[in-house]
Amino acid sequence: MLEILMAGGWALAPILICSAVALAIVLERWWSLRRKAVLPEGLGEEVRKWARSGQLDPAHLEALAAGSPLGELLAGALAVRNRPREQIKERIEDTGRHVVHRMERYLNTLGTIALIGPLLGLLGTVIGLIRMFMQVMAGGMADPTKMAGGIGEALICTAMGLVVAIPAYVLHRYFRSKVAGYCVDMERQATALLDDLTGTPAPAVRPRRTATSAATSG
């Protein structure tokens, strides 16, 4: 494998850097987007009990917000629980935008790597072919090993670009869909808390992309 990588030439370096960055992002997002880290089991029901009992203080809300994205969303609503319904909605919307943005952190970078991986492979291919033709122009067709080196460099860069891009694209889509699923669950929990705080049931809403739109449309 090392020999193959060395045969790819210097054009392979940016592809390897992209692969390292993509691996780091995948590991970090996999850990951060675990379900129990985003939506702790039973947290929504527990928070609604706290709201009904009225035993909430700033320190309690701060700990709730720091615990998980769902906790941050619910803490945003509880912080203004004594205000009119419209103001609670606005706070949930604002908090939800920040929560979703953090859950999608680094995913744009992962998508960019999936996009530029084949392009970097193509660049390496072109460089390898140029190198091959330059050697042919300098020495003619007498040394086929020089031509083979250029062709090998071109093919290795193309293959490595695809090897990096395909998993990056698949995992980018996977994490996007995972965040979207979390948003639906967070909308449901925020809607239930909003109903408890205002005493007014919210009408059924259609889940959307963000974590707050469904929770605030009632």
Image (cartoon, helix red, strand yellow):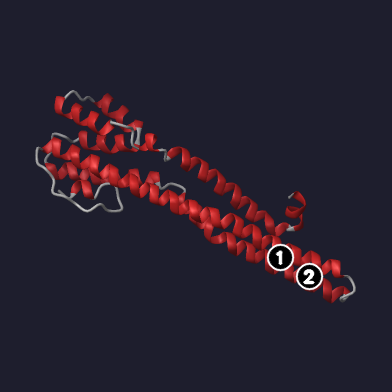
Q: Depth check: give the residue in front, 168 or 101.
A: 168
Residue at figure coordinates x 43%, y 46% from the top left: 105
Distance from the alpha carbon under mark 2 to that under mark 1: 9 Å
Residue at figure coordinates x 39%, y 44% from the top left: 103
Left or right, 216 with reference to 168: left
Q: Quadrant of residue 126?
A: bottom right
Q: Which residue is mark 1?
A: 154
Q: Amino acid at mark 1?
A: Ala
Tally the marks: 2
How many neighbours does mark 2 have within 10 angstroms: few (below 14), some (14-19), or many (20 or more)?
A: many
Q: Is residue 14 visible?
A: yes
- Percent coordinates x, y for residue 17 in the rendering: 62, 50
Q: Which mark is residue 132?
A: 2
- Relative to 51, is 169 above or below? below
Left or right, 161 with reference to 173: right
SS for dot 2: helix
Q: Which mark is residue 126?
A: none
Residue at figure coordinates x 47%, y 41% from the top left: 30
Left or right, 107 with reference to 68: right
- Percent coordinates x, y for residue 28 in the rendering: 49, 40
